[in-house]
Amino acid sequence: MKKNIIELRNVWKTYRMGDVDVNALRGMNFDVKKGEFVAIMGPSGSGKSTAVNMVGCLDIPTKGEVFLDGKNIAHLHESELAQIRGRKIGFIFQTFNLIHTISAKENITLAMVFQGVPVDKRNKRAEELLNKVNLSHRINHRPTEMSGGERQRVAIARALANNPDVILADEPTGNLDSKTGKMIMDFLRKLNKEDGKTIIMVTHDESLAKYADKIAHLRDGIIIKES
């Protein structure tokens, strides 16, 4: 039986808005097994973004425990979280979040700088990843010279730069047409099935959620059902 790579135990996240406390998460419990493809769905205001922040080590809970690969990260300092993020989690965003003034290759190598990877290994890894996403011919192009689908493939390559265990995809096809979106989803599924990557995807789109092994439905800061 596969072990859990991510566990949220009775996680609360409370924000202070003026004189009012707002509970974005209200005792959320959530497990992701190693090698699983999980979709998180829910309406606006359901707590999806906050849940992503917890799963992605971008924030710590007000109450509760968050385990990543068996390590409790709920009370770590930001510097420690940043190191864990860099090693364990690759991020893919709806808006790509690439640096427009540097090349595709440089966007990918930058992710490895903070992990202390030597220059020659960074360059070799970036070239291998651009080949993996079929963008070897775009190696020296800047994001502004690419289509939306090409930018997202560079973003996927960047997410894979440090060979993370988990890929966290936040509305990964939100800025793409349906044909390009299907191509990106097929690639994520391939990463899951062939490379064994754990994929956690946030989406509003039920047709995308069908790619997942498990769908977690979020409402009012808790998982109301899994399907």
Image (cartoon, helix red, strand yellow):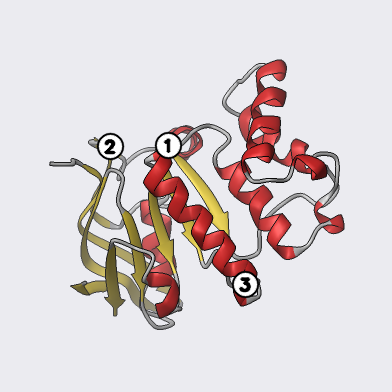
In the rendered view, does 211 fall on the left or right side of 124?
left
Task: State the residue in front, 58 or 152.
Answer: 152
- Give SS at disc 3: helix
Q: What type is the residue that disc 1 sits on?
A: Lys
In the rendered view, does 4 fall on the left or right side of 115?
left
Q: Quadrant of residue 223?
A: bottom left
Q: Position of residue 125 (x, y in %)?
A: 64, 27
Q: Quadrant of the N terminus?
A: top left
Tell me, yes or no, if residue 154 can be seen here: yes
Q: Position of residue 44 (x, y in %)?
A: 44, 82
Query: In this figure, which residue is indicated by the disc labeled 3?
Result: 179
Q: Quadrant of residue 2?
A: top left
- Give SS at disc 2: loop
Q: What type is the residue that disc 3 sits on?
A: Lys
Q: Position of residue 207 (x, y in %)?
A: 43, 77
Q: Contact (CB < 8 A) between labels 1 and 2?
A: yes
3D distance between C-alphas at marks 1 and 2: 9 Å
Q: Earlier in the sequence, mark 3 or mark 2?
A: 2
Q: Residue at x 40, y 79 (%)?
A: 206
In the rendered view, does 107 fall on the left or right side of 169?
right
Q: Earlier in the sequence, mark 1 or mark 2?
A: 2
Q: Residues within 10 Å of mark 1 (few under 14, many from 20)?
A: some
Indicate whether 219 appears above or below 162: below
Q: Residue at x 49, y 33 (%)?
A: 163
Query: In this figure, which residue is indicated by the disc labeled 1?
Result: 88
Query: In this figure, which residue is indicated by the disc labeled 2?
Result: 69
- Give SS at disc 1: helix
Q: Residue at x 59, y 72 (%)?
A: 174
